[in-house]
Amino acid sequence: MTGARAGLVGTALLLALAAPLAAPQPAGAGVVAGAVVVRSSGRAPVRDGRADVAFQQALEEAFRRALLEALRSVAPERQSPRDLETWQETILSRSGDFVAAWRILAQGERDGFVDLETEVEIWREKLARAARAPGVAAAAAPVRLLVLADSFAVSDPAADEEVDAGRLAAAALETELSRRGAVIVSTTDRAPWEDSSGPSSEENRVALAAAAAKRLEADAVLVARLTRRADGLTLAVQLIGVASETTLGASRADVPLTADAALDEAFQPAARQLVAALAPRLAAVRAGRSRGSLP
């Protein structure tokens, strides 16, 4: 299956109808006719039977990985953490602008995931100009975030006591968000819907979360929810825009529980995974804050 066009696709059908790419290049970043050619992979879970959505997400991940590899080639002098943060907002969040063509080398679905192996052709000069643009991220004000989590009692084997896993999950998310430059506003002890009587609809929960964040002058609110699974927990997060009261992004990750690991440490890998998945949406919120047009 082959494909060509600078932009992301929503279905495999569009790939099948597109024009072919040049012959495969060796692994790594090669250069052909003003472009950088990179082999990369992408992986995404299939949820609710939507393999087409998982295919798109896996392709987008492959594009981002290809761009990171290409950036090592076109801008080797700019590889600091600050450069990577800038590129997350200015390049990786709009990867389709830099992709000239691509080829699907292999694809498959296994254990609930879609896996892709791709070969991506990237506009070299366009990427180089964007990589060397000075001070783009510095001009954007940091995102102000509120993190809310449902109370969720769990027995902590390491501490031999029952703890609020919701609070521990929120703390892990706050740490990772702060590491990426977000400002965490003062949090509440309980999610606002937990203080109301009776069940709350999804629409009401979004409105209550946005209202709580607005009172604290936050730009967005991250709502965390825990559910039990066979050998641990599943942590799901929902990023909500305060101004629009709409969901901007969502993701989830598994949290394995073992007897020899403290519960707070168990949430750290999931927090890193979830915040990384939402990074493009956080970058959009940050850019919107800079322009005065928050979502």
Image (spheres, rainbow, N blue to C red):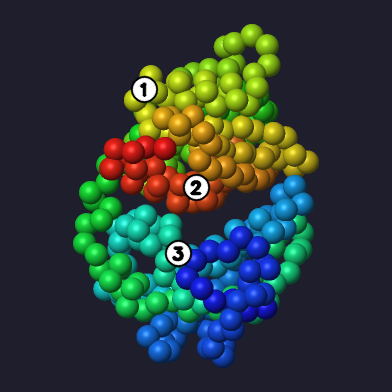
Position of 181 with respect to 259 (left or right) is left
Instruction: Say whether marks 1 and 2 touch (CB < 8 Å).
Output: no
Task: Tell me: residue 17, above or below residue 33.
Answer: above
* Crowd around label 1: few <14 · some 14–19 · many ≥20 (10 Å): some
Instruction: Report which residue position mark 3 lands on.
Output: 95
Instruction: Report which residue position mark 1 lands on.
Output: 216
Quarter the N terminus occupies: bottom right
Residue 294 x/y as whole percent: 37, 37
Residue occupying the far top of the picture: 197
Q: Secondary structure at mark 1?
A: loop
Disc assigned to residue 179? none
Identity of the amino acid at label 2? Answer: Leu
Instruction: Report which residue position mark 2 lands on.
Output: 278
Q: Secondary structure at mark 2?
A: helix
Q: Earlier in the sequence, mark 2 or mark 3?
A: 3
Q: Of 272 and 27, which appears nearest the observer?
A: 27
Q: Nearer the viewer, mark 2 or mark 3?
A: 3
* Crowd around label 2: few <14 · some 14–19 · many ≥20 (10 Å): some
Position of 40 with respect to 188 (left or right) is right
Q: Quadrant of residue 42?
A: bottom right
- Separation (CA) of disc 1 from disc 3: 33 Å
